[in-house]
Amino acid sequence: MSAGRRGLLALAGGLLPLGAAATPVNILRRVQDQGFLRVGVWLGAPPWGGFDADGRPDGSEIAIARLLARDMNLRLRLVPLRPEERVPALLADRCDVLAAALPMIGATLGRVAFTAPYGRVTAVFAARSDVKITTLADLAGKRVAMSAGTFAAEIAHAQLPPGATALFTPGIAQTIESLLLGEADVAVTYEWQLRDLQLARADLDIQPQLILRSWSYGLAAPLGQLDLLRFLNVFLFLRGADGSLAEIYARYFTAPLPEGLRFR
């Protein structure tokens, strides 16, 4: 570990001395004693989590998990989770931290402890430019593709008007593919995904039609783990200040870190 990295960790330790655990097990102490950190990730949601050309886990959340473990001088154990498993796995002690693009709204609030947000996403209904979706009522009679088990699919499905058909796909990429293949009329996707698609294929006629919802996400820890949560927040602050988070965001989203998430 470099002297600079040791200095950052020393600063974190000096700011946040370990205190009495609020739960029977102090996770921060435990991971330091055992020498490894278990991070729950979702590998079916690129660019947050997926695989590189060699089949190795890759994505923005994977990069953050690796940076965290390296800063803590611990071995990293990734725990692959389906989207609906994320919170239950943390509550059942199957992982120590979640880096799985967990939305900071809805059923997650009050069940886990979140760090400061370091990412933001906007879900939209997308379609060809000749398919006009200006209100939810315009979805009537349409086949709407959405990625099963995701928060975006949960809220989109609940808002579909009578006559609309929900088509659940295994992942985000398959949702867009179903639209391109004509299997769906509308897709629930994300603004960044449409932007990247348009940069790669300017000939494709797919446009965001109606905003579904925007939300922030952050790292998550079990409730009561104040030492761990404080450490995670110091980690995010320091890595935001030195530009590491912005570099990760730009690498995977081909865009700058959104305003308000700069940790400066």
Image (cartoon, helix red, strand yellow):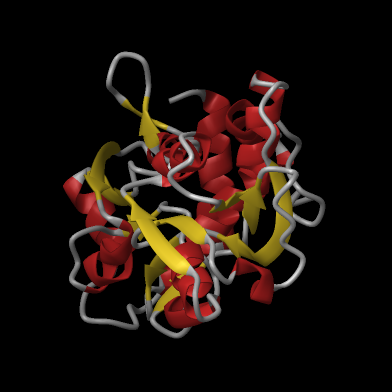
Say left or right for 75 vs 166. Answer: left
Say left or right for 121 vs 157. Answer: right
Q: What x and y, as percent, mark residue 34?
A: 17, 49
Q: What x and y, as percent, mark residue 183?
A: 43, 44
Residue plotted at (26% across, 42% down): 78
Q: What x and y, as percent, mark residue 42?
A: 34, 48
Using the rendered image of the protein, determine whether residue 217 is visible from the camera's viewpoint.
yes
Residue sitting nearer the eye, 110 or 6: 110
Residue plotted at (34% across, 62% down): 149
Q: How many marks?
A: 0
Residue sitting nearer the eye, 55 or 68: 55
Residue sitting nearer the eye, 184 or 211: 184
Above or below 258: residue 112: below
Above or below 263: residue 84: below
Q: What x and y, as percent, mark residue 211?
A: 71, 63
Above or below 157: residue 123: above
Residue plotted at (53% across, 32% down): 5
In what quadrant of the picture does the N terminus appear? top left
- The quadrant holding residue 70 is top left
Residue plotted at (25% across, 53% down): 81
Give the residue furthest to the top: 54
Using the rendered image of the protein, determine whether residue 17 is visible from the camera's viewpoint.
no
Residue sitting nearer the eye, 247 or 128: 128
Above or below 186: residue 257: above
- The quadrant holding residue 227 is bottom left
